[in-house]
Amino acid sequence: MVNRENKQILPSLYQERAWVEISRTALTSNVRYLLGRLSPGTEMMTVVKADAYGHGAVTVARTVLAAGAHWLGVATVPEGIELRENGISAPILVLGAVNAADEMRAIAHWQLQPTLTNPHQAMGAAQELGNSEHPYPVHLKIDTGMSRLGVGWESAVSFVQQVQELPNLVIASIYSHFATADDPDPMFMYQQHERFITVVNQLQQNGDGQLCLHIANSAATLRDSTLHHHRVRIGLATYGLYPSSHIQDQFKENRLCPVMQIKARITQVKLVGTGTGVSYGHQFVTQRPTSLAIVGIGYADGVPRNLSNKMMVLLRGEWVRQVGAITMDMLMIDVTDLPEVQPGEVVTVLGTDGSNHISAHDWAMLLGTIPWEILCGFKHRLPRINMD
Ligand SMILES: Cc1ncc(COP(=O)(O)O)c(C=O)c1O
């Protein structure tokens, strides 16, 4: 079944050139595995911002909720609205900043829950959300060392107290975010955690009993169950990737399954002689008579152009070299060593074919970036095929 902007389209039409396959089975299995690792009583929030890291927010949200996730996390109000418009009623936390009055009104209308980070914003929220009989749930974010969104941890106690004095609002959770949880050295992660706990202890001394707390992302969740608290906010691991190889090495067996695969068809095969320049700029010149296959996917689809002449793809389960500059809609591969390659054959650009696998980590290594960025790159042009 193809789902493009929520319209059902004939699969055959959209599997002519290139597509993204989303495995709901892998998604379900990852959520169940991660739920099984949580401390008793800890809830799971699946982070579905940026169209669920390129996987399709609506499909992912439905699948993870059916698998047992409790909450969804988005970055923006429109991302939350998209989920509500598609009938998703689970609690949704907007992780990003919400400042404008219009955004606050949309939050109330769509029953989303905002993150608050400063007194001015809290006053604005109190004007637009809730009333003293039905105070509106809000989540306070403390910056414990990420130096991104949040009230500085040193002034967090007084901020919490200010929000507590606003009768229209009720504090539904207090949270923070790790900056280095995927680093081999966990020292700063624990320092951030200590700061978080210092704030919480002060609040509890002041009489705040049951505060709902969360701080762990994928890396922290996998690393240490003492960081789970009442809720964890998991993105990358849900999509089947360990945040880093040293975290993966902690586990005897790999229990996370990548959810996304990128496939494309060969559209033409041609023989060229020795010394033939390939693609823009002739950055690759053949060293032998070469059978070139043209594959219908390019940088406009999400394959970074900087992978030109560096990446490999899988064809018939075998590794095949990509050659020449990756163009907007096509790339070339050298299929000289495979017999009788035909137009229409399917190339695995990212994913598994036979016993071989190409992961977003492999691309991230080649590009000097992180797998999060690779996954988010597949968002606009390719149709998504949701597989069971
Ligand atoms: C506030 C917040 N929490 C949780 C996450 C999930 O992180 P990860 O994908 O590493 O699990 C993110 C992602 O960037 C985030 O911004």
Image: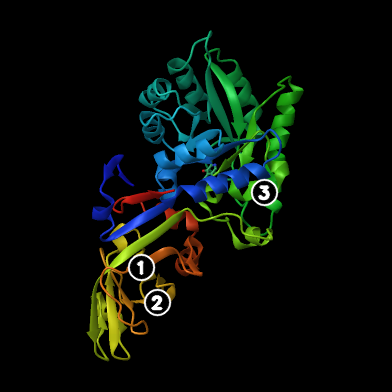
Q: Quadrant of residue 8?
A: top left
Does residue 178 show up? Answer: no
Residue 75 position (above or below residue 164):
below
Side of 355 where 102 appears, left or right: left
Earlier in the chain: of badge 1 and badge 2, it is 2
Look at the numbered disc 2 and give the secondary structure of its residue. strand
Residue contact between numbered discs 2 and 3, judged by CB atoms under 8 Å: no
Q: Which mark is residue 160?
A: none
Which residue was labeled with disc 3?
A: 189
Which residue corresponds to the image point at 32% horizontal and 90% vertical from the top-left? Answer: 287
Earlier in the chain: of badge 2 and badge 3, it is 3
Which residue was labeled with disc 1?
A: 347
Residue nearest the observer in this picture, 34 or 100:
34
Q: Amino acid at mark 1?
A: Val
Residue contact between numbered discs 1 and 2, judged by CB atoms under 8 Å: yes
Which residue corresponds to the image point at 35% horizontal and 29% vertical from the top-left? Answer: 85
